[in-house]
Image: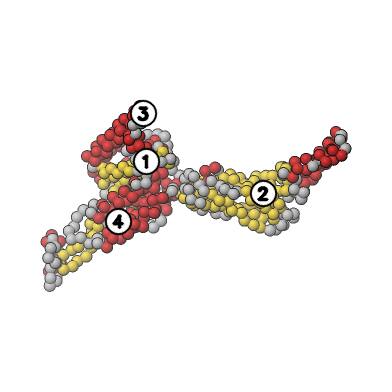
Amino acid sequence: MFISWRFPVLVLLGIGPVLLRPADSTVWAWLVLVTLAAAVDVWLAPARSALHVVRRPVGRTRQGDAGSTTLGLTNTGRRTVRGVVRDAWQPSAGASDNRHRLQLAPAASTEVTTGLRPTRRGDLQADRVTVRTLGPLGLAGRQGAIEVPGTLRVLPAFPSIRHLPSRLARLRELDGRAAVRVRGQGTEFDSLREYVSGDDVRSVDWRASARSRSVVVRTWQPERDRRLVLVLDTGRTSAGRVDDAPRLDAAMDAALLLATLATRAGDRVSFVAGDLGVRSQLQGSHRRDGVENLQDAMAGLQPVLVETNWRRLVGAVDTLGRQRALVVLLTALEPSAIQSGLLPLVGPLTARHRVLLASVRDPEIDRLARERGDAQATYAAAAAEQAGTQRDSTARLLSTLGVEVLDADADDLPVRLADHYLALKAKGLL
């Protein structure tokens, strides 16, 4: 049971009778009277079981975006249900305005909606629905909790989607001027046409020319149906916070923009994520829902404070197929982690694939390196410069081994990664 605000107000109103007849018996008589009134109110209040509660399908939303959940309420009892319904969720779901006043006549139904704004990815669960039903006097009532399961699927935030239209326009521009004169790596046959001055004689199709009255040449276009493999590091380095958000979130944002662009270009996008072991894996396909599947695969991933086992992740890349692919390693450019875990595997990986390492750079390091206000700031600047020098050295070492390196801030990395992909497409290197 519970008491409403009217109960203490009614108790305070007993001051009047006490002033009129000052005695202990008056006080006790008033308290007994109020208590009996509250007890009768509780007895007359509808039972919690009189209210049938169901949850409508919750669906999905993105981290930080607004969502909602709806409860369907039906009064199955014989008395009007007055009270409050509270729809509780775990704190990271960001439930707001989740207390709903209720007045339902017998056999009547209604719906109440609770706003959600999740602050973390994954499957967020509803807690309980608490029902308070008031008696006819409004002094007290009954309270009980109902288990009404609900799951909100929270997908990764995708702020870089605002850059997608401009990159798709560049992709269409590439497709519009895709025919090239000379065959090269990453090209496929497009069509036959008559020879014009300036065409490379190596492109002449002699068999077709023999059946024609003029010399015929072949034209080529950048090959479609290429493979892109995204490898997401969820180990220790992905837990570092950059601009008040985990580095993993920024890496996911960059991966989603690149995957969306590659899917629109007709390429197959595969995905591997892990730390000590493989946490999630997707085989590339031509289905249009590939990006949606990728978001679902990312939704439940969280940083794990362990060193990444790159041997297992690289082994997972091999299981996705032997065809040459663009392998994008989304990990931090941290010298100790790279040199001890990834570096020994770079040679065999670059022999089979084109490899690109995309790292989220922490702008705090650059800020510390510029400050010289006092002795403490100077020491911090020296440490920051040393860290930057080690990162640059590691990047050069990876480059000599055939790995392209992109090291950019969280806001710039998705755009630079997408532009690098388009540049490879334009040159026929993918």
Mark 4 → mark 2, Cα distance in angstroms: 57 Å
**Residue in front for this viewpoint, 225 or 400:** 400
- Residue 355: image location, x then y, percent: 27, 45
Residue that carries the numbered disc 4 in the rendered image: 225
Mark 3 → mark 4, Cα distance in angstroms: 57 Å
Q: Earlier in the sequence, mark 3 or mark 4?
A: 4
Residue that carries the numbered disc 3 in the rendered image: 374
Mark 2 → mark 1, Cα distance in angstroms: 46 Å
Q: Residue at x 44, y 48 (%)?
A: 156
**Label 3 vs label 4, nearer the camera:** 3
Amino acid under label 2? Val
Amino acid under label 1? Asp
Q: Identify the secondary structure beneath mark 1.
A: strand
Q: Identify the secondary structure beneath mark 3.
A: loop
Amino acid under label 4? Asp
Mark 1 → mark 4, Cα distance in angstroms: 26 Å
Exactly how many numbered labels are in the figure? 4
Q: Residues within 10 Å of mark 3 (few under 14, many from 20)?
A: few
Residue 262 vs 216, above or below: the answer is above
Residue that carries the numbered disc 1 in the rendered image: 233
Marks 1 & 4, CB-CB < 8 Å contact: no
